[in-house]
Image (tube, grey):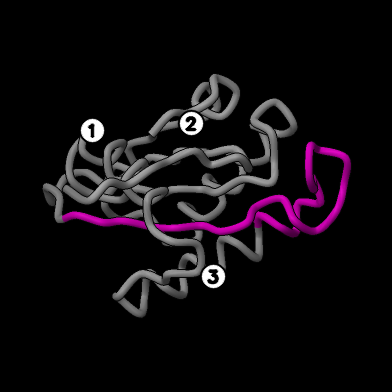
C-alpha cells in the first residue's frame, strides 16, 4: 500500500501495561489522531493494531487499513471498540483538511493478535483520505 508521508509520519506505537483499561487506549488513539491534525490530510482512515509484539502490532495496524470501510471486526468487543473510537475521533471537530467539521475519520478498523501476558502493544496507523491500495487476482 502506497502511503503519503504526512499520514505515515503521524502513525504511532505505544507499549501499554497489560492491565490498561480500554478507555486508556481509546484516549491515546484519539490523542494520536488529534496530534496528527491537518498534517495527515483528514478525513482519515485509522488502523489500530493491538497485541502481538512491538513490530507485529504495527503490521496489524496497517493490515487493518486493508479492510473495507464499514467492515466491522468479527469480535463484538472490538467491533464496538471501532465504533466508539470513530465517534470520539469525529467529535474532535478537525474535519476535512483540518478546516472543521464532524468527519475527521471515515472509519476506524482494529486488528488484534495474542500477546505476552507482560505487555500490551498498540499501534495506530493513520491513512489519508485518498487511501491508495490495490488488489490483484492471479
Q: Nearer the viewer, mark 1 or mark 2?
A: 2
User: Circle 2 — which element?
Assistant: loop
Q: In front: 2, or 111?
A: 2
For marks 3 and 2, the one nearer the N-term is 2
Above or below: residue 93 compared with residue 8? below
Residue 107: image location, x then y, percent: 56, 59
Q: Which residue is disc 1 drawn over?
A: 54
Q: Which residue is disc 3 drawn over?
A: 83
User: Circle 1 — which element?
Assistant: helix
User: Circle 3 — which element?
Assistant: helix
Q: Are marks 3 and 2 in contact (CB under 8 Å)?
A: no
Residue 81: image location, x then y, percent: 46, 68
Q: CA distance from mark 1 to mark 2?
A: 14 Å
Residue at (56% x, 68% y) in the render: 84
State the mark number for residue 11: 2
Residue 103: image location, x then y, percent: 75, 56
Q: Residues within 10 Å of mark 3 (few under 14, many from 20)?
A: some
Above or below: residue 67 compared with residue 14? below
**Span shown in magenta:** 89-113
For marks 1 and 2, the one nearer the N-term is 2
Amino acid at each position: 500500500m502506497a502511503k503519503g508521508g504526512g499520514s505515515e509520519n503521524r502513525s504511532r506505537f505505544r507499549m501499554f501495561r497489560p492491565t490498561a483499561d480500554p478507555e486508556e487506549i481509546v484516549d491515546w488513539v484519539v490523542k494520536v489522531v488529534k496530534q496528527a491534525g491537518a498534517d495527515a490530510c483528514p478525513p482519515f482512515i485509522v488502523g489500530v493494531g493491538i497485541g502481538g509484539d512491538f513490530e507485529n502490532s504495527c503490521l496489524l495496524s496497517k493490515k487493518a487499513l486493508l479492510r473495507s470501510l464499514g467492515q466491522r471486526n468479527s469480535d463484538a468487543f472490538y467491533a464496538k471498540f471501532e465504533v466508539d473510537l470513530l465517534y470520539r475521533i469525529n467529535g474532535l471537530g478537525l474535519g476535512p483538511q483540518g478546516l472543521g467539521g464532524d468527519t475527521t475519520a471515515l472509519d476506524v478498523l482494529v486488528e488484534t493478535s495474542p500477546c505476552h501476558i507482560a505487555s500490551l502493544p498498540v499501534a495506530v496507523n493513520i491513512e489519508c483520505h485518498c487511501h491508495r491500495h490495490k488488489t490483484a487476482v492471479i
